[in-house]
Image (spheres, rainbow, N blue to C red):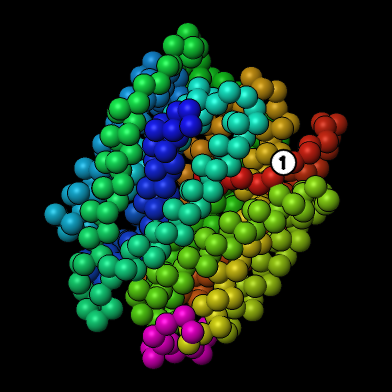
Amino acid sequence: MTHWRIKLSLILNYFVFAILLNSVGTVILQVQNNYGVSESSASVLEAFKDLTIALVSFLIASYITRIGYKRAMLFALALVTLACLLMPQVPAFWTTKLLFAATGAGFALIKVSVFATIGLITNDANEHASFMNFLESFFMIGVLSGYFLFSAFVDDKNPQSTSWLTTYYVLAGISLIAFLLLLSTSIDESGVRHEATKSFADDLGDMLRLAILPVVLVFIFTAFVYVLMEQGIMSWLPTFNSKILKLPVSLSIQMASILAASTAAGRFLAGVLLNRISWYWLLMICLVVSAGLVLLALPLAASVDGSNVTGWGDAPVAAFVFPLIGLCIAPIYPAINSAILSSLPLRQHGPMAGLIVIFSALGGTTGSIITGHVFEAYGGQTAFYFSLIPIGLLLLLITIFHRMQQKTGREVKLVSGVGGH
């Protein structure tokens, strides 16, 4: 297999970052148990991850080809390896913040470099699409694996135990293997060196000129609201399972994997359905069903006492029903991203991608912080009832966005939903 070492390294890169990026919900629960951190204080962990992703993505847009894709990825892997090793050695809330800042910075470097490197190691469009889908599938496998990996090291009998931090030795080992594989593999980047012609000011100007277009402004707000909702739910679901449903900590983390699994399934199904139904009507149906699931699942959770629950078999129905919201909201993000990119000329895809990364990161941070504060002040049920507000906003915003697109005279045909942020 040609380039097998670099391909395996890219897969491992995505795998380990998928676990780290999506461990925020698990870590939010554990820092409350271990370090006596309040819900509102714990909510800032999302900001350390997302704001760093946004800032680093913005700063490296012009210079990544000058730095070199391989060098950028090696730096990212070395950074998260050291951060993972520090976590169990210095168990404290500040090291947790440092870990997510390092993860955010590393993922910004990895995402840009990996996407560019795929073009260097594949021979045609079919091979490129095939490996891209394979890579994205491993990202979702990483998300699912993370819940079970962390829960394996949780001590349910002693909630204050820091045994869960042992997980970071495993993650450091995976990162180190990916680093060594990449280090021992040569990548010919000579073909893209000459493309680094734009200055930072030029890139910033392109983004600002694009951002003031009315259809782009509506899109930006739509993406922001969606990620605000998604991350608010995803980051606080383990805490909801533990504090509201009274499930054991390890089971609370494991059952949060239902949300990741249903999201993956939702994107796969959307890829099939979008060949038969308008993307706009699919998203409208998904949002209405999402609101229905919220109104169904949260009353079920009101009278639950899962203190005697020991495993999946005797978990309350609410623990299974609410995470199914992922099945409905999954198609929204990739669909709107595909719609806006398909509406723009190729020369504007780069600046638009930058805007997507930045405002998605800001939305994720805002959603987690708002949910954390509402969770602390009014309880978990009220915090999750608040998801009805962004659902209502999305119904309005996507309708406006769709109508603005129609006025341009373009019919956008969407392709299958490999997405995420």
Q: Position of residue 295 (x, y in %)?
A: 64, 76
Q: Is residue 297 visible?
A: yes
Q: Is residue 282 left or right of residue 257?
A: right
Magenta stretch holds residue 155: no
Q: Could you tell me which residue is drawn at 76 percent across and 61 percent down?
A: 285
Q: Position of residue 33 (x, y in %)?
A: 26, 71
Q: Is residue 116 left or right of residue 28?
A: right
At mark 1, the secondary structure is: loop
Q: Is residue 98 visible?
A: no
Q: Could you tell me which residue is drawn at 34 percent across and 44 percent down?
A: 103
Instruction: Classify mark 1: residues with Cα within 10 Å, few (<14), some (14-19) or many (20+).
Output: some
Magenta stretch holds residue 309: yes
Please determine whether, in this image, residue 112 is positioned above or below residue 331. above
The one nearer the camera, 397 or 142, is: 142
Q: Position of residue 165 (x, y in %)?
A: 23, 61
Q: Could you tell me which residue is drawn at 78 percent across and 38 percent down?
A: 413
Q: Could you tell me which residue is drawn at 35 percent across and 73 percent down?
A: 250
Q: Is residue 258 left or right of residue 176?
A: right
The one nearer the camera, 206 or 125, is: 125
The one nearer the camera, 412 or 15, is: 15
Indicate the amino acid at tag 1: Val
**Magenta residues, as a range?**
301-313
The residue carrying mark 1 is 415
The one nearer the camera, 221 or 255, is: 255
Please determine whether, in this image, residue 128 is positioned above or below residue 154. above
